[in-house]
Image (cartoon, grey):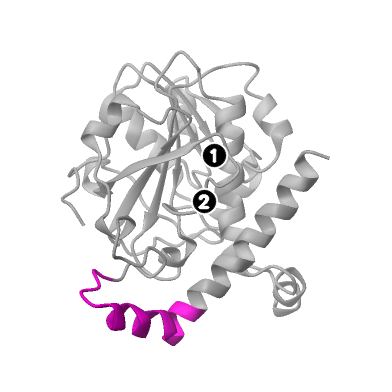
Amino acid sequence: MTAMNEYMFLNPNWRILTVGDGDLSFSHALLSAIKPKALVASTYDSKETLCNKYTDNALELLENAEVSVLTQFDVTDQADWQRLNGQQFDLVIFQFPLIPAFTSERVFKEQTQSTSANTLNRALLHQFIKNACEHALDKAGPQLCYITSKDVKPYLHWNIEGSLVNNLDAHYLGQMNFDIKQFPGYKVRNVDRDKHVKDTSGITYVFSPIKNSELCNTLSYPSYLTANYCDLCRAGPFCFEEDKQKHVNAKKHQQMLKLEADWLQWLTQFHKRDHA
């Protein structure tokens, strides 16, 4: 992989929307770090749930700074995006997204009977990019979506830079390293309880309806997306054809192919319903 920028690129002149910010600590850290031209913060939980779940949250700090905070904001629900009331943004950020934990083994079996957790997480991100592009990004601006995710399993199995934007008017532009030290006060929280998740290396993936964004010059493009690599497994380069075939026949690659097939099946069904 080519060397990546040390920091997430942010322009103080941008209007920024954050989504899925559990305890709102990222939004507050972002506000303190760069003081963007405009900031709207949102979280999936209701105000009551947010305060009960995360005793140390940044809701009051943001409200005191006169930052608009949207609670119960579901990135997969187009009706929630309408709550922006036409407000337009240059950048929408989703930090360390993950579907909520299943409430019980029974619920887990019911919800993953036909759709795997891998596909459900990809679906969350796919709909985030779709709705952000359609309802939040100003066509006169840079039109950027950032997704920051951990560089470990199972997140690596989501193929974020590969097929996430299939069937969308959006493109993967490249990526940047994420350094949490850029945002003092930001704590990566467990999605379902008041627990600080151990800091791990992260990557910020960049998407936009504009294929040749000016930001492309500051992004890296991983080598595993080029020829003679397996983009699904991030393996290679393969020096000989027999090495490539050995990889293709390996259990790990076959598992990744199954995950990709399940994802593409969901995509087909989703967009058939969307255009019905």
| Circle 2 crowding by C-alpha within 10 Å: few under 14, some 14–19, many from 20 | many
Q: Residue furthest top?
A: 140
User: Which residues fall within the magenta stretch?
Assistant: 236-254
In this rendering, would 112 be left or right of 273? left
Compared to residue 55, the image places residue 86 above or below, namely above
Instruction: Give the amino acid at mark 1.
Output: Ile
Say which residue label 1 marks: 129
Residue at the image point whose x is 60% and y is 67% from the top: 261
Say which residue label 2 marks: 164
State yes or no: residue 95 in magenta. Answer: no
Quarter occupied by residue 246:
bottom left
Instruction: Give the amino acid at mark 2.
Output: Leu
Q: Position of residue 111 (x, y in %)?
A: 73, 68
Q: Position of residue 6 (x, y in %)?
A: 17, 44
| Circle 1 crowding by C-alpha within 10 Å: few under 14, some 14–19, many from 20 | many
In front of the other: 134 or 258: 258
Residue at the image point whose x is 31% and y is 65% from the top: 229
Local SS, label 2: loop
Quadrant for the N terminus, please.
bottom left
In this rendering, would 252 be left or right of 78? left
Compared to residue 202, the image places residue 101 above or below, namely below
Sequence-wise, the earlier of marks 2 and 1 is: 1
Local SS, label 1: helix
State yes or no: residue 248 in magenta. Answer: yes
Compared to residue 219, the image places residue 82 above or below, namely above
Q: Position of residue 141 (x, y in %)?
A: 42, 17
> Is residue 58 at all visible to an observer of this figure?
no
> Is residue 241 at all visible to an observer of this figure?
yes
CB-based contact (under 8 Å), mark 2 and mark 1:
yes
Q: Position of residue 92 (x, y in %)?
A: 46, 32
